[in-house]
Image (cartoon, helix red, strand yellow):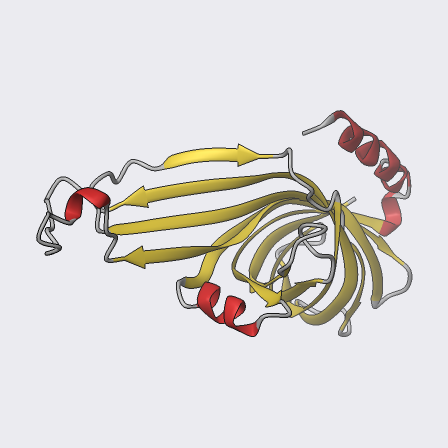
């Protein structure tokens, strides 16, 4: 984690002082992520789309919650996020595949399938409000908010059918948006294991309305939906 992110953590520490009104969550999630594309040339988008599909992504971190009233909570925190998409291309043809008679050869030592994964690595700082049902053993809730995502790197991974060991490269030196703003919505249930401990599960959806890169002919925006599980400790 870069040094400025430690300062974000210090800004959240005052929540600990309000012990009778706060809680701490440890949360992780799996989700399907993809991207929306916008370009003046629609055929370019169609060509790109033909080889792409959603990717299973992850986020992990913790939340601080502050109780405004019996049923309303404010939330912030820090999450490590890996989100992106993948593409698969089959029927690869190399120069050595074509003989002098222009017939196609398929040597066993050359790859036929190439798979790429494009993984954006972010630090997420959510700011949300949660409304819960009346306090009981089981409670339902809904939550909405915004979440700036601090860019870390774009990780590219690739594998082929002839070389299953993945190659990998991290890219940080291009014109990426340093802060990617997202809105999110979630609903779920929580179970009180004891007076101080709760378990919760929540389906959630995020849309990133900042372009991932500036000054490109194709505008890319990410979105994701999945399931988060968490353990909550009342402070």
In the rendered image, residue 174, in percent from the top left (x then y), is placed at 65, 38
Q: Nearer the viewer, residue 144 or 46?
A: 46
- Residue 87 seen from this side: yes
Q: Residue at x 66, y 67 (%)?
A: 137
How many numbered marks appear? 0
Q: Is residue 94 left or right of residue 212?
A: left
Q: Residue at x 13, y 55 (%)?
A: 102
Q: Residue furthest front?
A: 100
* Residue 53 rendering spot, x and y as whole percentages: 43, 63
Is 46 displayed left or right of 220 in the figure? left
Q: Quadrant of residue 164?
A: top left
Quarter-of-image position of residue 147: bottom right
The reply to whether residue 64 is visible in this rendering is no
Which residue occupies the foreground of this view, 162 or 62?
A: 162
Measured as percent of width and height from the top left, residue 76 is found at 79, 50
What residue is drawn where x is 52% and y is 40%? 155
Query: On the rendered structure, is 1 left or right of 51?
Result: right
Q: In which quadrant is the N terminus drawn?
A: top right
In front: 31, or 162? 162
| Residue at 10 percent of width and 44 percent of height | 108
Residue sticking out furthest to the top:
3
- 218 vs 101, left or right, is right
Q: Position of residue 8 (x, y in %)?
A: 82, 36
């Amino acid at each position: 984690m870069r040094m400025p992110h430690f300062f974000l953590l210090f800004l959240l520490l005052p929540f600990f002082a309000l012990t009778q009104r706060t809680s701490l969550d440890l949360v992780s999630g799996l989700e399907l992520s993809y991207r929306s594309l916008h370009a003046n040339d629609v055929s370019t988008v169609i060509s790109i789309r033909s080889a792409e599909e959603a990717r299973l992504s992850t986020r992990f971190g913790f939340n601080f919650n502050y109780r405004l009233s019996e049923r309303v909570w404010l939330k912030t925190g820090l999450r490590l996020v890996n989100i992106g998409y993948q593409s698969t291309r089959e029927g690869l043809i190399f120069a050595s595949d074509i003989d002098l008679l222009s017939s196609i050869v398929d040597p066993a030592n050359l790859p036929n399938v190439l798979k790429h994964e494009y993984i954006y690595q972010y630090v997420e700082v959510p700011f949300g409000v949660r409304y819960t049902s009346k306090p009981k053993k089981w409670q339902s809730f809904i939550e909405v908010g915004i979440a700036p995502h601090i860019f870390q790197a774009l990780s590219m991974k690739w594998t082929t059918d002839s070389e299953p060991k993945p190659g990998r490269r991290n890219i940080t030196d291009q014109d990426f948006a340093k802060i990617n703003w997202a809105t999110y919505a979630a609903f779920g249930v929580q179970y009180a294991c004891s007076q101080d401990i709760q378990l919760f599960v929540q389906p959630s959806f995020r849309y990133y309305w900042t372009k991932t890169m500036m000054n490109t002919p194709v505008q890319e925006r990410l979105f994701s939906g999945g399931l988060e599980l968490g353990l909550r400790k009342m402070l």
